[in-house]
Image: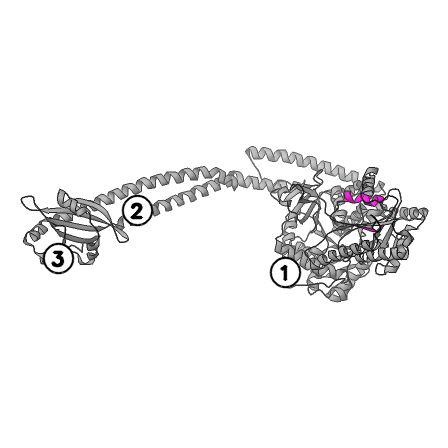
Amino acid sequence: MKRILIFILPILIIVTLGFTVFGVIQARFTEDRLMDDLKRKAKTVDESLELSAKFILLNNDLKSANRLVENFQKRERFQGCVIYDKNGQIIAITERFSDWKNKEKMYLEDILTAKIPRGALEKFKDYSVYSYIIPVLDDDNNILGLVEVIYDTSYLFNALTELWRRISVTLITLIFLITLVTFLIQRQIFILPVRRLTKWFGHFQRGETDKLRPFEEKGEFGKLVSEVEQVALSLRVARKVVSDEAQVRIKKDELWTESKLRDLVHAKLGENALVVVSNREPYMHIIQESTGKPKCVRPASGVVTAIDPILRACGGTWVAHGSAAADRSFVNSKDKLGVPPEDNRYILKRVWLSKEEEEGYYYGFANEGLWPLCHVTHTRPIFRESDWQMYKKVNHKFAQSVLDELPVKNPFVFIQDYHFTLLPKIIKEKRPDAIIALFWHIPWPNPEVFAICPYHLEILDGMLGCDLIGFHVQNHCNNFLDTANRLIECRVDTEKFSVVSKNKETFIRSFPISVNTPAVSGKSKLAAEEINKIKNEYDLQDKIIGVGVERIDYTKGIIERIMAIDRFLEKYPEYRKKFVFIQLAAPSRTHIKRYHELMGEIDELVEKKNWKYSEGSWKPIIYLKRHFSPEEIEPYYALADFCVVSSLHDGMNLVAKEYVASKTDASGALILSKFTGAARELTDAVLINPYSIEEFADAIKFTVDMPIDEKRKRMENMRKAVTENNVYKWAGNIITELTALKKT
């Protein structure tokens, strides 16, 4: 459309200017013509009155004068007639025009003196009239008086207005016709061919290189199509070779790596790239407060930590909410960009939400409703009808965005977390051929707890649009099956571990999520000066160092952790001035009242405990409250003698696995809550009940006193578990399940 406007705009400007000039000339001509006609009529009438007026003035016959002026009032467009004596005094005037008496007429004296007729436009009240006056003379050429006729001129202006209306209508009609004809020509010779080519190229973008062109193009477009066909042929051959080679390598490799996952994707998915959907985007463009310039960062998120390496390995499209201040400045016309910025491996498509949508869908229903509900109500869940309506609206908006990205046949959609429970059903209704998986990253509660949600039926119905639903641990799978069995009309197959609802079968599986061990291990080889810089800044030389890394959330047990450190120092005072705990805490969901209150509680508690034990420059807790990038966290993992994960309830918790993966020398120890999914895999961690402060404090004592050999043995066992069951294996298992569903 922009091209058409650029082409047609100069033409329209020229036509408009031409018609305007023509209109001005035509209007002036018409005005002059009508005015001349009016003057001629006025002169003729005035001259016809002259003889009668001469007789009346000679005989001073006032009665005849009044009769005369009244006889002329019936003429077309005639306003009035006036007879003046030789002194310029009115002796007779048309009755309906009697107000003319009150008008100042400075010109009368000049006419009486010069004895010359005068015609002119005069302003009278709120309109214009034309006045024509002739002198009445006797036989000796002496002035007897004056005769004036007055005509209405409004018809002149009406005629000019009508003329401009006709010109305007003609101009608009012409502009419309020119635009229409131009558009039709452009559409036929340019737009339609480009549209057909764009649609055809879209198939190649989605990996459908076997798609044949359904049309014939000639000229330059035909040459372009032929070239693209040759490229598509080359791609088909190359993809077949890669797929065959991938099948061979998969069978050879034992440890899951980025390349093995890539081979699996080529072998199992072929040309159908994965489409991932999440609320949190993997890369954000923020505005730096110090410089005011945009900066690309990776947000602190378990979903990002897990999914980013997968799409780096196999490519595809990630659909997510573009929430950062500078996000719009880095996308193309289709709201897409290549990521990571330094090495584009996959496509990020950003979905824009209004403040009202974000408030209702994300902060409201998702994080004040579903989040506390699924974490066994450590805080009371809040369900508002307005939030639910906005949640549904946003799910539909994301669904449309995802549908726009799906290939023509057999697409694979991988939805993340509790933000999009309605999305599977919406997509499935539009694309029944789509294979859809949803991974639930947080715990799934028992049926009694989940039934608290007023919209549980709609949520379950939406989720069962999936072909596969994944959870971290088997217990959450069991809870989901039990929830479906008790709350909705369905059939639960305990052998196949599936739910059949409305003649649609959904499989339920546990897939313990993990981290990218090779990548993390590589980054952990930090220069000694980086670690020493932190030690010098916080005076950590010769100290026992513990570390915690969390979002500030009531489920993470940060309050319990601080109380346990307090109790540890009370029971074992010999560790005072020898022990320091570093807490990295990223503010989260600060718009929600409970989270805002929690930050205040933690601030106050840290300050209180540091004041309680402070001696000189030493304080037991270093509390760093800001967002940390993965690269910034790495040195803290490296220098820490132990890491604490004290979640009160957690689906998995990747911090525990990240810390273990970072310990390439098998040093360090892990204190881990029993109420995390990670506790089922990392059995060599020091497992705790974070609600028991006494047990927690003793676990810290046990950990810092643990012999080096025992620490090493425990860490080696945990590293083996994390390495063998890394994020690539997690993704590989899910893709294998998805492709198995495709064949059934």
Residue 66 tag number: 3
Q: Residue at x 25, y 42 (%)?
A: 32
The one of 253 and 141 positioned closer to us in this rendering: 141
Say if 399 sits above or below 235 in the image: below
Report helix, strand or loop for mark 1: helix
Say which quarter of the image contains residue 417: bottom right
Q: Which residues are magenta?
A: 616-643
Rate crowding at label 3 as few (under 14), some (14 to 19) or many (20 or more) other CA atoms within 10 Å.
Answer: some
Report helix, strand or loop for mark 3: helix
The one of 519 and 648 positioned closer to us in this rendering: 648
Q: CA distance from mark 2 to mark 3?
A: 36 Å
Report helix, strand or loop for mark 2: helix
Membership of 626 in magenta stretch:
yes
Q: Residue furthest front?
A: 616
| Residue 76 in view | no
Q: Nearer the viewer, mark 3 or mark 1?
A: 3
Say if 48 sits above or below 391 in the image: above
Q: Which residue is mark 1?
A: 389
Q: Position of residue 246 (x, y in %)?
A: 79, 40
Rate crowding at label 1 as few (under 14), some (14 to 19) or many (20 or more) other CA atoms within 10 Å.
Answer: some
The residue type indicated by label 2 comes to Leu
Q: Is residue 31 left or right of residue 612?
A: left
Colouring rule applied to residues: one colour
Residue 340 tag number: none
Q: Which residue is mark 2?
A: 160
Q: CA distance from mark 3 to mark 1?
A: 84 Å
Q: Earlier in the sequence, mark 1 or mark 2?
A: 2
Q: Position of residue 289 (x, y in %)?
A: 67, 44
Q: Earlier in the sequence, mark 2 or mark 3?
A: 3
Residues tagged 3 and 1 counted as in contact (Cβ below 8 A): no
